[in-house]
Structures are given as structure tokens and as C-alpha cells.
Image: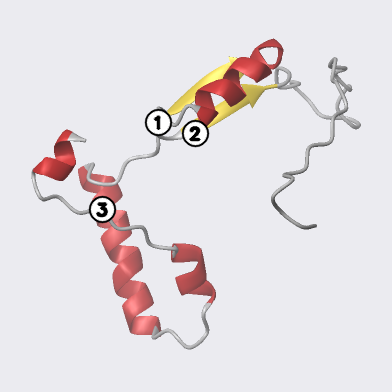
Amino acid sequence: MELFSKSISFHGILLDAFFENKSSHSIVKKELVQLIYDGIANGAVRPLSSILFGYKEAEQAFRYMASGKHIGKVIIKIRNEEPEIKAAPTPVRMLATLRTAFNPEKSY
């Protein structure tokens, strides 16, 4: 919250929507791509931070995400990468409880 007291503003941009829009000017798109490349090169644009949970910690991962204290990606690792894929990946079984939840204040 300290950043907000310094009169800093944050803006979200849906780049995928901008680039999918056929009516956008190609010159602007090229300039934007160059700005992004320059930002990556000089360190101004960085990937989101991430935190990794194992599949046995899935509940903790969802609780962490629901707490709203995270910034970036929350990843649940189900299995290790297989060195060479020759067929479909080996299935991993997880204990799950089937539940259906509906908000009584809403209509579906």
C-alpha cells in the first residue's frame, strides 16, 4: 500500500486483445513490440514472480491464492517432466472430494 501513497498509478493492458484487433494500426503495433523488446533488454519488463506447490499441497496453494497476499503466479506441480515423451503421460491419481456449491443469493 506504500506505493499508492507516493501517487504512483498502475495500469493493466490487455495486449492479446490489442494484437487480435484487426483495426489497430500496424505501425503502433510495431512500435509497441519494439518498446516491449527494449524493456525486456534493459530489465524494465520482468516476468512475474512465481511460487511452486507440490500436488500434495494443492489445498495450501488455493488458500494462499485466496488470501490475496500473492503477486504473480501460483503453480501446482503435478509430476516431474518425463525425459522423453513416447506416449500419453503416466496418470497421477489424487484424492478428491466431489462437492457442488451454489450461492443461495444467485440464480443459475
- The residue that disc 3 covers is 10
Q: CA distance from mark 3 to mark 2?
A: 18 Å
Considering the numbered disc 1 on the image, is that residue within a helix, a strand or a loop?
loop
Q: Amino acid at mark 3?
A: Phe
Residue 49: give its label.
Answer: 1
In the drawing, does residue 60 fall left or right of residue 34?
Answer: right
Q: Residue at x 38, y 62 (%)?
A: 13
In the rendered image, residue 94, in percent from the top left (x then y), is placed at 84, 16
Mark 2: secondary structure: strand
> Badge 2 local density, few (<14 within 10 Å), some, or many (20+)?
few
- Cβ atoms under marks 2 and 1 closer than 8 Å: yes
Q: Secondary structure at mark 3?
A: loop
Q: Which numbered disc flags the more N-terminal residue, 3 or 2?
A: 3
Is residue 30 rendered to the left or right of residue 99?
left
Specify the farthest residue to the left. 6
**What amino acid type is highlighted by mark number 2?**
Lys
Q: Which mark is residue 24?
A: none
Viewer-nearest of labels 3 and 2?
Answer: 3
The amino acid sitting under disc 1 is Ser
Query: Hey, which quadrant is residue 95 in on the image?
Result: top right
Viewer-proximal residue among 101 and 39? 101
Quadrant housing residue 82: top right
Cα–Cα span, label 1 and label 3: 17 Å
Circle 2 residue:
73
**Where does residue 81 sit, x and y in percent of width and height?**
71, 22
Q: Give me the residue at 10% from left, 50% from top.
A: 7
